[in-house]
Amino acid sequence: MPKFITELTRRNVFRVAAAYTVVAWVIAQAIDLAADSFDAPDWVMKITLAVLISGLPVALVLSWAFELTPEGVMKSDDVPVSESITPKTGHTLNRLTTIALVFALAFIAWDKLGSDGEPAGGAQAEKSVAVLPFADLSESQDQEWFADGLTEEILNALARLPELKVTARTSSFEFKNTNIDIGEIAARLGVAHVVEGSVRRIGNNLRVTAQLIRAEDGFHLWSDTYDRNTEDLFEVQNDVAEKVAATLDVILDDEKRERMFAVGTRNVEAFEIFLRARDLHTKAHDREMVDPVSLADVNALLDEAMALDPRFSKSAILHADRFAHYLIEGYSAIVGDAEDLDSNAALEQFHHDYDIAIANAPDPVSGLVAQINKDFFASQWHRLPALTGQLSKLVGDEPIVFEGGGWLNEILLLSGESEISEIMTNNRRRADPLSQPRWLDAINLELMRDDFDAAIDLADQARSVLGATPRLREMEILVALLRGDKSSAKLLLEERSDYTGDFAYFNSLLATLRGDRDGAVRLAEELDSATEWPNYNLIIVYNTMGDQARLQTLVRRLDNMLIGPTILAIHIAAFGHALWFDLDDAPNLKKRLAEAQINPESIRDMSLR
């Protein structure tokens, strides 16, 4: 046997095997790359591999049986050992193998880094992940709210790590209860990995499964099953998030762990109640539901959660939303039973809730955002310039997660803080590509900059992603009116008819653009008289109608309300950074703008004067 091994070595059989293997690998990679470029069918690569693999034994047999000599190829047995040049041939094979290895290593490096030095996959960076809604496998199928809450907290924990790109809740939950392939979901969200799992709960017994999947090939990089008690909920959430981060090569220190796991409460019962309330809060904002829930239902649960943990900032911010809706739109289905409310009491409760959120914010940005929102609903705006300045210093180019965005983007646009608005809007839109509010923020930013073409381009992109939603149609109509193109606005409105809910004012606007003034006035007055609160959407209608008297009356009514300046400011920021009314008709707003050091001349003037 030793003699046979020695002879194999002398005849360069091992060197041929090594050289053939490396060269064949390089050839296979080159053909695979060419096949992808020319969209060659799968059988091309299959045949290539079959030929290369079957060629190896042939090459080994030939290297044993034949030898290259100065006179040509001869049988090895016919060449005396003293005249053999196999040592020289062996050196040549070594050089060939080395050259092939250099090509192989260069290809691997290029494939890993990408041809432009960025991670392969472009937008799908290696450290990117979407956390899909965990499935509710409970016997009664009544724990969906719990599974959703668990999912969101894992998502939020990962999103607090700047090294990771994490898809936000709205976009991840878009794929809830669908059978779409993991690879397609990852491609639409621009991520390289997906976390999915399930929750099974029976009483206080909890089984959670989770797995991290590489979207490119469906390979499970990590998975685990947790059989725990509900009291261990936070530990399960934390462990899943930590294992996912570690698997994606994120190094966690104590500071990062503390940032990741800032849930806001350590009271499991309070947290469970909060999860139920948040589920209802989402449903309450679906105003097209046949049997809608209200924010009164939400707050009934939040009152319980806050009684168990009075410092729970997330509960406080959610609790404040009912009072904000009441202050802006009065009695409505989303507010719920409001007979026990009046404006002063609602505003006092709103500020109280935000005081809790500010005092117990999990990070400086969340606390600052809460303070900005609270002051926006205050009787003075003199602190807003300093607060937005502080925010500008805290927020960098990296994505940042914070609680309770509220009316932040409207405040930034109104204040002329376009740079910080752009950073936050772009970061949040990249993290949440299927979220309509993120697209609307980006469109409004371009309108503030008077870049109508960019705004329309963004609206077209949003349509391709989200479909033709009423809110996007509203933005397109707005751009047309800002340009003075009433015929295009009319065509957009005629895509549908009989608008309801938040878009009922479209009916009056369409009648106006059709030249039916009497019909437009009748529809507007019916809408305005439907509630005690004036409808600020009618500002656009009366402006387009050219009815100075009705516009002036409406603006004065709004300006004299308890938070009238706030309502009018939201209208300015959300409707193209434009004054659709004479500012002299809103003296309270004019005073607030002066307090906030906002120059009215920086706002586009669309008034009738």
Image (cartoon, rainbow, N blue to C red):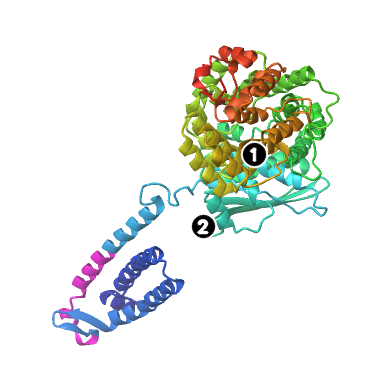
Q: Per the image, is 296 magenta?
A: no
Q: Residue at x 60, y 22 (%)?
A: 581
The image quadrant where one finds the N terminus is bottom left
Horizontal side, residue 464 vs residue 75: left or right: right
The reply to whether residue 559 is visible in this rendering is yes
Horizontal side, residue 38 vs residue 607: left or right: left
Q: Is the residue 423 above or below the residue 173 in the image?
A: above
* Circle 1 or circle 2, nearest the eye: 1
Q: Residues within 10 Å of mark 2 (few under 14, many from 20)?
A: some
Front in this rendered view, residue 359 or 597: 597
Q: Estimate the spatial distance between the alpha carbons at disc 1 and disc 2, rounded to whole Å.
A: 49 Å
Q: Is the residue 60 above or below the residue 176 in the image?
A: below
Q: Which residue is mark 2?
A: 216
The image quadrant where one finds the C terminus is top right
Q: Is the residue 470 above or below the residue 54 in the image?
A: above
Disc 1 residue type?
Answer: Leu
Secondary element at image label 1? helix
Disc 2 residue type?
Answer: Glu
Q: Position of residue 436 (x, y in %)?
A: 60, 41
Residues under numbered marks 1 and 2 in contact, where contact means CB atoms less than 8 Å apart: no
Q: Which residue is mark 1?
A: 510
Magenta stretch in the rendered image = 77-97
